[in-house]
Amino acid sequence: MSNTHPPMRAACFHGSDRITIETAPRPEPKAGEAVLRVMRTALCGSDFKLWHQGSDHIAGHEIFGRVDEPGHAMQGTRCAVYIPEHCGHCDACEAGDTQMCLTVSSLIGWNRDGGYAEFVRVPDNCLLPVPDDIEDDLAPLLLDTIGTSAHAVREAGRFVPAEAKRPVLVTGAGPVGLGVVIALKALRYGEVFVSDPNGERVAIARSFGAKDHPVGSRETRFAAIFECSGAHAARNLAIELVLPKGVIILVGENAAPWTITEDKIFRRKDFAMLRTFYFPKGDLQPNIELLRAHRDAYRRLVDERFPLDTLPERFSHFAQGRSIKPVLAFAGDV
């Protein structure tokens, strides 16, 4: 069937830090899919790779919108987009670990078109309904900022439970790191420290109840360290600072080879190293409740809203660390 819809506008990531706004055909859904009219897409630091290297697909993976598919069972429903495609029936999916599907390895905004566009094609099982009391600007936070962060904290609880009231450290106070701070305080962990070279972000973390831990300081040891920057230097420092029987949670992304420099400490201490990725769909409702309970804190993270035409400029602004969680807004709602 030919596409009878008018073309849409979308961002094209060319590489070499260049983005242009182009026209593209509006996507046509396949069986088991719907088209979402995008209302918000939050910018994410993981997209810097596509900004530098270019992308064969439309980027953007923190997507919120409304189903725009007449006849679809979810027509008109406000939805966030769960980015990992998943089969729903492999061992991982059956166990509820939908972010770790053993059959499908594809991420919306990476391996197929994403949300820096007016419309996006979404598998039905990746549509996450968002209640009407969650404001549009905050809805994308249910994905990376809340979903990824809260999942990391819940997983860490298997090693260092909140009731133990042991000191924990968050390295990297970007959106995910700040999300970890909010989740730690919400789940009643004891002393929470944060380390980041950006003083403004540390100040925000302090307003959430965290304490400042100077970058590179070796004076304090921690039962759990949430490494959210992805920096190898921070990972190596975490090996030094984690207490015996403690846990390092690798949340930040870094595809470059990692050489462990703290060799003696690494060999002479029992500790766990835990990698966490995204979140299982079953976390959606607890994450909605987390957002409801700490709405004002999450509002502080969304510090810019802008239209598609200004994405090239705003993405550069974001890459310079001059905003925390800017959101791209569509449908004249800027």
Image: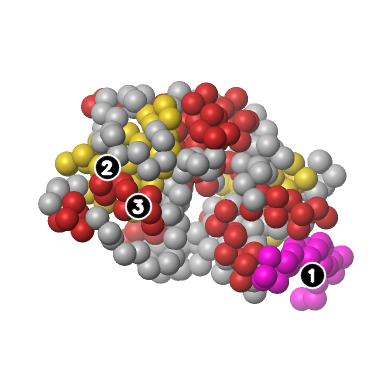
Neighbor class of circle 1 (other Cα within 10 Å; few <14, some 14-19, many 20+) is some
Q: Is residue 73 magenta?
A: no
Image coords of residue 197 (percent x, y): 50, 42
Q: State the image coordinates of residue 166 (x, y, percent, origin top left).
A: 26, 28
Q: Per the image, is 6 magenta?
A: yes
Which residue is under mark 2? 241
Residue at numbered disc 1:
25
Q: Nearer the viewer, residue 274 or 69?
A: 274
**Looking at the image, which residue is at 47% across and 40% down?**
196
Magenta span: predominant SS is strand
Among numbered discs 1 and 2, the one appearing first in the sequence: 1
Q: Quadrant of residue 149?
A: top left
Residue 64 in view: no
Q: Dot 3: within a 10 Å radius of its alpha carbon, few (fewer than 14), some, or many (20 or more) residues?
A: many
Residue 208 at x, y percent in the picture: 50, 25
**Which residue is painted at 17% across and 55% down in the image?**
264
Residue at mark 3: 235
Q: Which residues are magenta?
A: 1-23
Find numbered disc 2 in the image and state the secondary structure of the residue it sits on: helix
Left or right placement of residue 216 versus residue 147 in this view: left
